[in-house]
Amino acid sequence: MATLKRLALAASMLALSGMGAFADTIKIGINQPLTGSVAASGTFITDGAKLAAQAVNEKGGVLGGKQIELVIEDNKSNPSEAAAAAEKLISRDEVAAMMGAWGSTFTLAVMPKLEEYGVPMVVETASSSKVTSAGNPWVFRIAPTSEMEAKAFGRLVPKFEVKKADFLVVNNDWGRGAADEFGKMLKAQGVSVGLVETMDPAAQDVSAQLAKIKASDADTLFVTTGFEQLSLVFKQAKALGIDRRTITTGGSQFPDRLAEQLGGAADNSYHILFFAPWFPEAAANPDVAGQYIDMWNKSGFDKSGLSDGFRGFDAVTTIAAAIDKAGSADPKAIRDALWAVDVKGVNGNIKFDKVGVEGSESGQSSPNVYVIEIKDGKLALPQI
């Protein structure tokens, strides 16, 4: 049955590529969490993808005038649903390429579908090293790995004068991977690593973990989770009287919303991001960042989503560039073309290095990393 399914899909893909000269649109699949525990981030990223498609189409589309059509599926913040969404996007909707699938656990669940059907995916958020070390040649990541994020932040550790650090992370590939990579980076600089506490992705109470952290003598707390749970951490930490420098990782923290909604509870916190829209002059490509911010503001989207929506914007822009370079909507041709793109993105220039298993390498770009401070209820570039 599996062989028949692959043959049927191959036939349909052949028909699709053969019809390229007659099709008015080229479909790109969007596999994101629009409901569930990380819905806010997934929604903003999808909004960014819509703006990129709009920008491409307003400039004449791809392949000499064809329009980009986004086919959007909700993976419900669940790995099984993410795999099912990928199956639908590829086998039923016949997308030429995909963007997905937010978290590392969701993305890892999708990856076998990419190999089974031969469709490339640009990974916009997932940071686990497993994503690009698994030997999947259909994966191209524009987000930094946790290792890359930790290495970039490592240059600031002496200025922060961290002596001992605790961790509180979501209990999945993303959170555990961040704790591991940041822990290794800190230890290499002579910083002591204390507690490593985890929390279920759906947890509504983390007071038990925070009570242990309060009793610790660490001077810094690293936290990795989505915005919704991060808000809970700050609220409960304040209620418990924890007054400690907090550094959040992962890039999906929405510090402007934290400052607005939590007030003083978020003060003395620092947030590692991959785009800081409040300071566009600090972006690697200020012109592209300015275009993106202008489009976002005109769209009426929630302004707090700017710091995450760029992921979708850069991902779809990259896929569109690969389609043009490929000269067709054939998924394999797009995959091959992704190795040759050099795209000016909001985060910086996007081009892929080969990483992972020799002969089956995945693509990994080298994104920029920024740090934002919440001070007196406002956002600032830290003076360090």
Image (cartoon, helix red, strand yellow):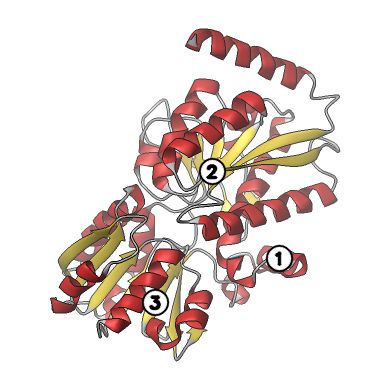
State left or right for residue 272 relative to residue 199: right
Residue drawn where x is 29% and y is 53% of the image = 171
Q: Which part of the image, by quadrant, shows the C terminus? A: bottom left
Mark 1 residue type:
Trp
Mark 2 residue type:
Gly
In the rendering, at what x and y percent does residue 217 appear?
13, 79
Q: Which disc, if any, is residue 80?
A: none
Q: Is residue 344 visible?
A: no
Depth order, front residue of 164/104: 104
Callout 2: SS: strand
Q: Which residue is mark 1?
A: 296
Tell me which label, 3 or 1, sits earlier in the chain.
Answer: 3
Q: Is residue 74 above or below residue 287?
A: above
State left or right for residue 261 relative to residue 191: right
Query: Real-space Cα distance between discs 1 and 2?
Result: 21 Å
Within-10-Å neighbours for mark 2: few <14, some 14–19, many 20+:
many
Q: Which disc, if any, is residue 270?
A: 3
Residue drawn where x is 43% and y is 61% of the image = 226
Examine the image and state in which quarter residue 161 appears.
Answer: bottom left
Q: Kindly report which numbered mark, 3 or 2, lies closer to the viewer in this rendering.
A: 2
Tell me which label, 3 or 2, sits earlier in the chain.
Answer: 2
In the rendering, at what x and y percent does residue 378 appear?
50, 86
In the picture as drawn, the residue positioned furthest to the bottom comes out as 376
Q: Is residue 380 above or below residue 360?
A: below
State left or right for residue 135 relative to residue 296: left
State left or right for residue 376 relative to residue 47: left
Q: Which residue is mark 2?
A: 100
